[in-house]
Image (cartoon, rainbow, N blue to C red):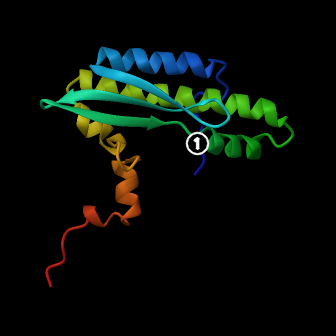
Amino acid sequence: MAINLKNYTTEVPAQRSIENIEKLLVEFGATNIMKEYSPNQTCAAISFLIQMDGMMLPFRLPANPENVFKWLKKKKPQSQEKTLREQSLRIAWKQQYEWVFLQLSLIELNQADKLELFFPYLYDVNKKETYYQKLKQGGFKALLPESTT
């Protein structure tokens, strides 16, 4: 599937997108915001807590610039790797900002609630995996109805 990708030419530094995500999350009640860094010293994920129904729930919002880099490499094979890696980081975090902004807009308009939209990113701190990763690891069987045999 090919679409006209939004923000793939962004010049917004990744750090600014990350800061904007943090501001949005704080406005919607997030606390204990933490950034996780990869071995190459770039931000790999933002973790945060949000109180819902009297419970503090942890979430982890990752960015995957490596996959963006692979996409860019196909689109611009003559470009220098360093340039593509820098652009990949900008794109990955700008896309995450746009996603968070749109999700929080739906919450603001009472189209959905926080947990409904952030559920895949609900984080099991002990196992270091999101709810989505747990479901995927189990072959999504938890989503299927029990067989009636």
Mark 1 is surrounded, within 10 Å at the Cα level, by few (under 14), some (14 to 19) or many (20 or more) other residues, namely: few
Task: Please count the marks in the image.
Answer: 1
- Residue 12: quarter of image: top right
Q: Compared to 149, does 27 lie above or below?
A: above
Q: Residue at x 21, y 27 (%)?
A: 51
Q: Position of residue 149 (x, y in %)?
A: 15, 85
Q: Residue at x 71, y 40 (%)?
A: 72
Q: Residue at x 60, y 47 (%)?
A: 2
Q: Residue at x 49, y 30 (%)?
A: 96
Mark 1 lies on residue: 3
Q: For the view shown, which residue lies furthest in the bottom direction?
A: 149
Q: Compared to 106, does 141 lie above or below?
A: below
In this image, 83 relative to 47: left or right?
Answer: right
- Residue 111: quarter of image: top left
Q: Amino acid at mark 1?
A: Ile
Q: Compared to 23, does 35 lie above or below?
A: below
In this image, 137 relative to 73: left or right?
Answer: left
- Residue 15: quarter of image: top right
Q: Nearer the viewer, residue 72 or 85?
A: 85
Q: Position of residue 6 (x, y in %)?
A: 57, 30
In this image, 149 relative to 75: left or right?
Answer: left
Q: For the view shown, which residue lies furthest in the front direction?
A: 126
Q: Position of residue 19 (x, y in %)?
A: 49, 16
Q: Position of residue 13 (x, y in %)?
A: 63, 18
SS assignment at label 1: loop
